[in-house]
C-alpha cells in the first residue's frame, strides 16, 4: 500500500515492479491458522524506537500482522531492542534520509519528543503516508491546525496516540451523558499526579563533553533552538521544558480531557486562565524559570453555551498532585480520587472516571452507585493502534476510518484546546521590571480566545505562544 486510500492491489504492484512472478496462494496452505498474507500487511516505519516509540512500533507490528521496514532514532543505543527484533528493517538516525530513501512504505508511527512531532508527521503526510502520532499531537496550537488540514487534504488515515480514546469506558460515559443521567453538566474537574519528572526548575547548563556517544544531538534538537548538549533532557525529562515539551497538561490532558470533551460535544473554547505554583530557593524571592513548565498549575477553560450545553461548560484542570474538592455526594459515598481522573458534575449527579477514561462511576442521589468495569479490555495501546492500522488498510473514508476515536479531524481541534491551557500558563510567567525595581507579572489575566482564527483577542503578548520560532533549516510550512 503506497497511500492510505489504496488497498492490497498495491502489494501486487510492488511485486510486479520488482520483476517477480506472483500469484495468490490460499493462506491456509502458506501459513496455517493465524497466517497473514503479505497482501494484507502494511509496511510500517517507526520514528522513535526507544521507550514509547518501541511500544508504538511493536503495536503496529502486532506480532507479524504488519511489517516494520525501517526504524529511525537519533540514539541507536536506545533503539537496540527494536533493531534486534526487526533485523530486516533498515535503520536511520535522520528522519529526512528515511523519507527520501524509503518510498514505498504505507504508514508511520511518530513517537519523538513533542517538539518534533509535527515536522515529521507533516513531511510523511505530504508523501501520502498514514501516521500515528503520540499525544499531544503537536507542540503548538498552530501545528495542530496544520496537521488537521494536511491530513484532510492528503486523504490519509491518522490517529493520535491517546489510547484511552478507544476505551470502552469512554463510550459508556458518552452514553450516560446523552441520556442526561446526571442532568445538565456545567463543570468538569480534571487532575493528575504529573509531573513525575523534574519540573519548575532551571534548565541544566550546557555540557557538550557529557553527551552520550550514541546520541545525535543535532537531530534530537530538530526544530528547537540551537544549544550545546544539555544534561537532563534526553531521553525523558525534556517534558518539563517549553522548548521541547508541553508539561503536565500536554502529557496527560489528551488522556484525561478526552471523555468529557467527546461526551459534551465540545468545540473551541472561548476563554482560559491559569495560576501556577511559585518555587522559593531563597526567602521572599520566587525562582524565575520561564524556560520551564511550572511545578503545579490550575487552569480553567471555558466553553460557550450551545444546544447541547445550554449553560456552557468549564473545565478545571489541576496538576502536580493537587486534587479537586469533592462534591458532598461523593464524600457521602466514600469515593476516593485516583492519582489522575475526572469528575463530570451535573445538576442531578456526578460521573467519575480514572486515567484513560477507565472505570467510570455514576453517582445519583437516592440510587446505588453504578460502576462500569473496564478491566476486561486489555492492552489499550494495542487496541488503539490496531484500529488505526486496520483503518489504513480499509482506506480513507472507510467505515473503519470513520470509526477511529482520535483521527486528526478530532485530535487536532482537541489538542488545540488542551494546549490552550499552556497559553495561559506561559502568559502567567511573563514579567517586566517596574520603576520601583519590582516585577509586574502582567500576563496574569483571563485570555479570550477566537478559535477559528487561533488568536487571543484581549492580550496580544499571549499570541507568541500560539506558534514558536523554528531553528534555521527546520522550519515547518508557513509557521
Image (spheres, grey):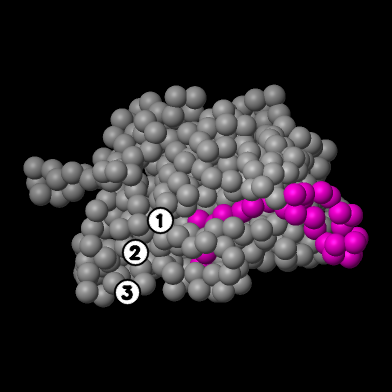
Helix or strand or loop: what does disc 2 sit on?
A: loop
Image quadrant of residue 460?
top left
Residue 372 highlighted magenta (yes or no): no
- Is residue 56 visible in the rendered image? The answer is no
Helix or strand or loop: what does disc 1 sit on?
A: loop
* Labelled disc at residue 221: none
Front residue of 26 and 137: 26
What residue span does the magenta drawing correspond to? 21-50
Residue 45 highlighted magenta (yes or no): yes
Q: Which residue appears at 29% of the width and 72% of the height?
A: 211
According to the picture, the residue beneath numbered tag 1 turns out to be 94
Disc 2 + disc 1, Cβ < 8 Å: yes
- Report the magenta stretch's main SS: loop
Quarter holding the N terminus? top right
Q: Which residue appears at 49% of the width and 69% of the height?
A: 79
Q: Disc count in the image?
A: 3
Disc 2 + disc 3, Cβ < 8 Å: no
According to the picture, the residue beneath numbered tag 2 turns out to be 216
Front residue of 38 and 474: 38
Tell me residue 475's x, y (percent): 33, 40
Tell me residue 284's x, y (percent): 21, 63
Image quadrant of residue 46?
bottom right
Q: Is residue 330 left or right of residue 211?
A: right
According to the picture, the residue beneath numbered tag 3 turns out to be 213
Amino acid at each position: 500500500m503506497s497511500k492510505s486510500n489504496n488497498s492490497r492491489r498495491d502489494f501486487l504492484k510492488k511485486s510486479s515492479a520488482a520483476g517477480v512472478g506472483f500469484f495468490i496462494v490460499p493462506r491456509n496452505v502458506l501459513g496455517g491458522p493465524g497466517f497473514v498474507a503479505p497482501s494484507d500487511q502494511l509496511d510500517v516505519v517507526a520514528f522513535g524506537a526507544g521507550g514509547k516509540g518501541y511500544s508504538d512500533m511493536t503495536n503496529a507490528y502486532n506480532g507479524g500482522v504488519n511489517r516494520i521496514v525501517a526504524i529511525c532514532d537519533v540514539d541507536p543505543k536506545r533503539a537496540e531492542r527494536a533493531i534486534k527484533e526487526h533485523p530486516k528493517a533498515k535503520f536511520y538516525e535522520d528522519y529526512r534520509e528515511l523519507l527520501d530513501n524509503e518510498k514505498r512504505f504505507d504508514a508511520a508511527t511518530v513517537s519523538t519528543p513533542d517538539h518534533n512531532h509535527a515536522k515529521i508527521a507533516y513531511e510523511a503526510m505530504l508523501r501520502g503516508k498514514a501516521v500515528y502520532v503520540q499525544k499531544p499531537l503537536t507542540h503548538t496550537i498552530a501545528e495542530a491546525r496544520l496537521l488537521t488540514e494536511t491530513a484532510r487534504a492528503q486523504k490519509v488515515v491518522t490517529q493520535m496516540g491517546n489510547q484511552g480514546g478507544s476505551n470502552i469506558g469512554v463510550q459508556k460515559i458518552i452514553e450516560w451523558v446523552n441520556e442526561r443521567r446526571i442532568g445538565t453538566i456545567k463543570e468538569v474537574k480534571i487532575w493528575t499526579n504529573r509531573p513525575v519528572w523534574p519540573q519548575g526548575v532551571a534548565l541544566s547548563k550546557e555540557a557538550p563533553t557529557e553527551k552520550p556517544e550514541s546520541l545525535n544531538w543535532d537531530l534530537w534538537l530538530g526544530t528547537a533552538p540551537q544549544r550545546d548538549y544539555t544534561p537532563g533532557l534526553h531521553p525523558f525529562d525534556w517534558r518539563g521544558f517549553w522548548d521541547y515539551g508541553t508539561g503536565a497538561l500536554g502529557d496527560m490532558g489528551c488522556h484525561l480531557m478526552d471523555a468529557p470533551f467527546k461526551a459534551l460535544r465540545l468545540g473551541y473554547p472561548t476563554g482560559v486562565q491559569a495560576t501556577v505554583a511559585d518555587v522559593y530557593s531563597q526567602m521572599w524571592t520566587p525562582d524565575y524559570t520561564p524556560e520551564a513548565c511550572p511545578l503545579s498549575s490550575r487552569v480553567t477553560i471555558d466553553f460557550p453555551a450551545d444546544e447541547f450545553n445550554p449553560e456552557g461548560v468549564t473545565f478545571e484542570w489541576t496538576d502536580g498532585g493537587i486534587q479537586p474538592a469533592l462534591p458532598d455526594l461523593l464524600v457521602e459515598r466514600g469515593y476516593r480520587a485516583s492519582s489522575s481522573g475526572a469528575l463530570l458534575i451535573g445538576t442531578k449527579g456526578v460521573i467519575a472516571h480514572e486515567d484513560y477514561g477507565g472505570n467510570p462511576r455514576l453517582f445519583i442521589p437516592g440510587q446505588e452507585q453504578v460502576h462500569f468495569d473496564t478491566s476486561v479490555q486489555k492492552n489499550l495501546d494495542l487496541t488503539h493502534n490496531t484500529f488505526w492500522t486496520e483503518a489504513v488498510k480499509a482506506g480513507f473514508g472507510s467505515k473503519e476510518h470513520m470509526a477511529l476515536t482520535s483521527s486528526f479531524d478530532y485530535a487536532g481541534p482537541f489538542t488545540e484546546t488542551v494546549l490552550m491551557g499552556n497559553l495561559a500558563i506561559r502568559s502567567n510567567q511573563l514579567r517586566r521590571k517596574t520603576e520601583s525595581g519590582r516585577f509586574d507579572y502582567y500576563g496574569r489575566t483571563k485570555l479570550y480566545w477566537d478559535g477559528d482564527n487561533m488568536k487571543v483577542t484581549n492580550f496580544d503578548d499571549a499570541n507568541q505562544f500560539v506558534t514558536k520560532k523554528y531553528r534555521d533549516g527546520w522550519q515547518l510550512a508557513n509557521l
